Image (cartoon, grey):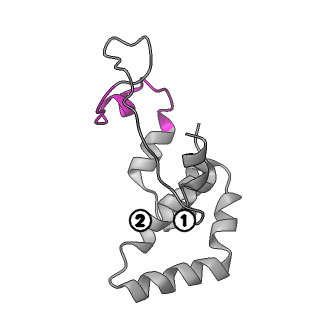
């Protein structure tokens, strides 16, 4: 599973805001989206396959391919780079390394960090 709110925030920040030519343009983009209700509207999009078009203004092939192959062992996911297999019982499974997660109150990954 995944958090729809996290997906919306990530798609917007990485593919729409961070590509702006300057920090001022990026800030303007965020303010414009905030006051237009862009994120709230995106959270209400159904079906999910239309989310990228709502957020980005175009169909993103990577997102579409991920949605059309939901099985963890499907062709789309097998072709992704995997650093190590953490699921127990798999042939190449490894013991997960100890990790330390640092987050803060306004970090948009805070909820996921607290539940990790």
Residue wearing tag 2: 15
What residue is shown at x 31% (from left), y 33% (from top)? 82
Choose top left, top right, bottom left or bottom right for residue 37: bottom right
Q: Disc 2 versus disc 1: distance between alpha carbons?
A: 9 Å
The N terminus sits in image quarter: top right
Residue 55 is tagged as 1
Q: Could you tell me residue 21's position as x and y percent?
A: 32, 83
In the rendered structure, the answer to whether residue 39 lies left or right of residue 97 reads right
Above or below for 50 versus 16: above
Choose top left, top right, bottom left or bottom right for residue 8: bottom right
Q: Nearer the viewer, mark 2 or mark 1?
A: 2
Q: Secondary structure at mark 2?
A: helix
Q: Secondary structure at mark 1?
A: helix
Q: Is residue 55 magenta?
A: no
Q: Is residue 78 magenta?
A: yes
What residue is shown at x 31% (from left), y 16% (from top)? 92
Q: What's drawn in magenta, residue-wise?
A: 68-84
Q: Could you tell me residue 113's position as x and y percent?
A: 54, 47
């Amino acid at each position: 599973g995944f958090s729809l709110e996290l997906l919306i925030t990530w798609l917007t920040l990485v593919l729409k805001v961070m590509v702006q030519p300057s920090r001022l343009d990026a800030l303007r983009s965020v303010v414009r989206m905030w006051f237009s209700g862009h994120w709230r509207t995106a959270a209400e999009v159904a079906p999910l396959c239309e989310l990228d078009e709502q957020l980005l203004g175009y169909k993103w092939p990577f997102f579409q391919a991920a949605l059309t192959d939901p099985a963890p062992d499907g062709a789309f996911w097998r072709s992704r780079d995997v650093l190590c297999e953490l699921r127990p019982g798999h042939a190449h499974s490894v013991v997960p390394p100890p990790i330390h997660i640092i987050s803060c109150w306004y970090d948009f990954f805070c909820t996921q960090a607290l539940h990790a």
